[in-house]
């Protein structure tokens, strides 16, 4: 089987702690979502599916400028796992690995995405987790078959804790894998880190 990697970018959150739509916040020369999509595409991902909420038409419009597909998570109160399932089910069936990316981590480098893909090609049965300074971060790359185990009522954490031996840490010099952006203070800190 030919090994290929796709990505699911989660953009269906309510951004309640941010107070405004996180994916559409200005960042650098574009927006948070445009930066995340640029990173995935420049890192070597050819198929990206963006998961938006029922009210996410503006986010979907912004994402479509990058030539990606958008799908709606119809579960208004759904958690991250429900969005992952919607994205997973929209990815080409032959895909062997899926990167689960979040708009919350806009400073991840394209080289990190490339490194995740390379590791998947070497270790297709493993969950690849980027680390920096010994701490695990995002995005994760999961084998497609393993992501099929994410059934109703399960979380991504449940999947990761099911068998720790399936997780392969990938040490990187990319602090962006650790920088989570949830609040206005986080956003200001992220903006300050841009060149």
Image (spheres, rainbow, N blue to C red):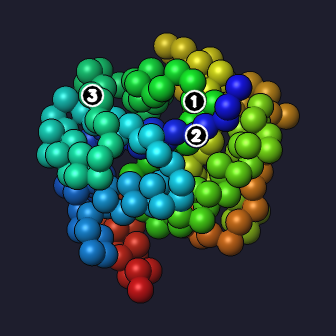
Please identify the quadrant where the N terminus is shown: top right
Spatial CA span between label 1 and label 2: 6 Å
- Residue 26 coordinates in the image, percent (x, y): 23, 68
**Residue 95 badge:** 1
Write down the residue under mark 3: 72
Residue lying at the far right of the rendered structure: 165
**Residue at the (52%, 21%) spot, across then down:** 93
Among the two numbered marks 1 and 3 on one chain, the one whose residue lies closer to the N terminus: 3
x and y, in percent, of residue 140 in the image: 61, 45
Q: Earlier in the sequence, mark 3 or mark 2?
A: 2
Q: Are marks 1 and 2 in contact (CB under 8 Å)?
A: yes
Q: Is residue 139 left or right of residue 48?
A: right
As measured in the structure, the alpha-carbon distance from the residue carrying label 3 to the one carrying label 2 is: 21 Å
> Judging from the image, what secondary structure is the residue with disc 3 in?
strand
The one nearer the camera, 4 or 153, is 4
The residue tagged 2 is 5
| Position of residue 8 measured from the top left corner of the image (x, y, whole percent) | 45, 38
Mark 1 or 3, which is nearer the eye?
A: 1
Q: Residues within 10 Å of mark 3 (few under 14, many from 20)?
A: some
Quadrant in which residue 126 is drawn: top right
Between 37 and 32, the one nearer to me in the picture: 37
Q: Residue at x 41, y 86 (%)?
A: 195
Inspect this view and state whether residue 70 appears. yes
């Amino acid at each position: 089987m030919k090994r290929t990697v796709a990505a699911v970018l989660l953009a269906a959150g309510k951004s309640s702690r941010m107070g405004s739509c996180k994916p559409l916040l200005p960042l650098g020369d574009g927006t948070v979502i445009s930066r995340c999509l640029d990173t995935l595409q420049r890192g070597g991902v050819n198929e990206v599916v963006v998961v938006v909420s029922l009210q996410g038409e503006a986010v979907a419009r912004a994402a479509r400028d990058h030539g990606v597909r958008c799908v709606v998570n119809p579960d208004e109160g759904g958690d991250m796992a429900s969005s992952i399932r919607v994205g997973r089910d929209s990815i080409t069936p032959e895909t062997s690995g899926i990167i689960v990316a979040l708009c919350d981590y806009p400073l991840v480098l394209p080289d990190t995405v490339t490194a995740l893909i390379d590791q998947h090609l070497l270790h297709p049965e493993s969950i690849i987790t980027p680390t920096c300074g010994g701490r695990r971060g995002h995005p994760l790359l999961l084998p497609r078959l393993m992501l099929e185990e994410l059934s109703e009522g399960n979380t991504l954490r449940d999947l990761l804790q099911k068998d720790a031996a399936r997780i392969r840490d990938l040490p990187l010099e990319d602090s962006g894998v650790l920088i989570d952006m949830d609040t206005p203070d986080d956003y200001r800190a992220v903006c300050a880190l841009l060149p």
